[in-house]
Amino acid sequence: MSAAARRRVYLHIGAPKTGTTYLQDRLSLNAKALAAHDVHFPTRSALVSPALFHFRAALDLQGQDWGGEPGHAEGSWDALVRRVRRRTGTVVVSHEILAPASAEHVAKAKRDLSGPGGDTEIHVVYSARDLGRQLPAAWQESIKQGRTWSYRRFLKRARRGRTWFARSFDLPAVLGTWSAGLPPEQVHVVTVPQRGSGVSVAGPGAPGGDELWLRFCRAFSIDPAWAPAESERTNPSLGAAESALLRRLNTSLGRRTRGGPDFDALVRGLLAEQELVGRESGRVGLPPRFHDWAEEQSERWIEWVEASGVHVVGDVADLRPVRPGPDESWNDPDRVPPRRQLAAAVDALAAMTREAARREDPDRQIGSRVRDQARRLLDS
């Protein structure tokens, strides 16, 4: 930290699908322990988690209002800024929806967090993952959130830069905006390790330990010993059959139900992150025709990083996608045989039936409606 600075603010801006859920939860769990070392992850109140507070603040900064009741984000950015300015030492602000922010919103974020006294040193942290893993994970995430588009349509739009995820993943574009006015040593790129080199996403029990978490700690200048509590939060991938089933379920439920308050907890929490995880139906990867393009993009990213002189935590080689081996076939989630979907649908139906029976008045609950839709899928 420079001699004049009383405060160092790390703006972790994403990207999505780079272990952000685990990072934010671990910072939250260890907030008190970190504060004892003058490292802060601000929250608004005991009733609002830091991760939710930062999400709402990022929405408010960008003039957006989704993911909750109308107006739920209003005032959150100013509230976050006030809490940051009250702190000395290190402050971490983290949410992945910040990645594709406009130049206007980026300038406002830096200006507000710096304050009028010039006593704040701003750092930007961007975590990046190769497109061979990131794009399939992003499509699955959109399906978990209720989208109904096919994998083919998602990839076609992503290749043209016409999805929110694609804009968030474009490392040169994102950091070209966020690094404006900052010396390169205050811009940090954290690479997500490749499979077999540590851990693909941070999480307890992962082979090789929490290598990604250790990389985040180095980027934030945090001693890992200051945050001993491990997070149990994960955001697991689904297989091809489970992804196809969930997309069909989203279509059958309709937009109104998918936008309801219980959808995220029930369909995403119960099905997508519990009941349908770990089934052997084939991993969703990039189609073979996208491999050359993904490799071209990775080389463009690496060239930008090396030319910019920004601080890299990890290895830029992690940004190069790894092609499947000769014994790995591609599983098209848009063309999953009905029999494979049927097995997943039976498990989903059983889970929804148990949930509906557990509730006091299942006829009025979304669980009952989802259960009925699952039965229709079985009959179709």
Image: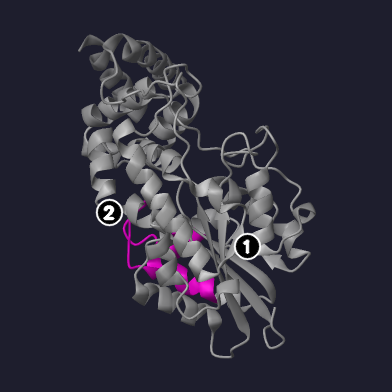
Q: Residue at x 67, y 84 (%)?
A: 5
What range is drawn magenta here? Answer: 54-81
- Where is residue 250 drawn, in percent x and y? 27, 31
Secondary structure type for disc 2: loop
Q: Identity of the amino acid at label 2?
A: Gly
Q: Is residue 92 visible?
A: yes
- Where is residue 10 drawn, in percent x and y? 59, 68
Q: Is residue 209 left or right of residue 269?
A: right
Task: From this view, report whether residue 342 is shown above or below residue 173.
Answer: above
Considering only order in the chain, which callout, 1 or 2, is on the residue closer to the N terminus?
1
Q: Nearer the viewer, residue 8 or 252?
A: 8
Task: From this view, report whether residue 156 is shown above or below residue 307.
Answer: above
Kindly indicate the quadrant of the structure image that contains residue 141.
top left
- Where is residue 170 drawn, in percent x and y? 38, 57
Q: Nearer the viewer, residue 11 or 371?
A: 11
- Where is residue 66 drawn, in percent x and y? 33, 55
Q: Residue at x 37, y 49 (%)?
A: 296
Task: Locate the N terminus by quadrant.
Answer: bottom right
Q: Which residue is denoted by mark 2 in the rendering?
A: 161
Q: Identity of the amino acid at label 1?
A: Phe
Secondary structure type for disc 1: loop
- In this view, the residue farthest toward the bottom is 117
Kindly indicate the quadrant of the structure image that contains residue 311.
bottom right
Task: From this view, report whether residue 379 is shown above or below residue 234.
Answer: above
Q: Residue at x 29, y 35 (%)?
A: 289
Q: Please tell me the numbered disc located at residue 33.
A: none
Q: Which residue is denoted by mark 1 in the rendering?
A: 41
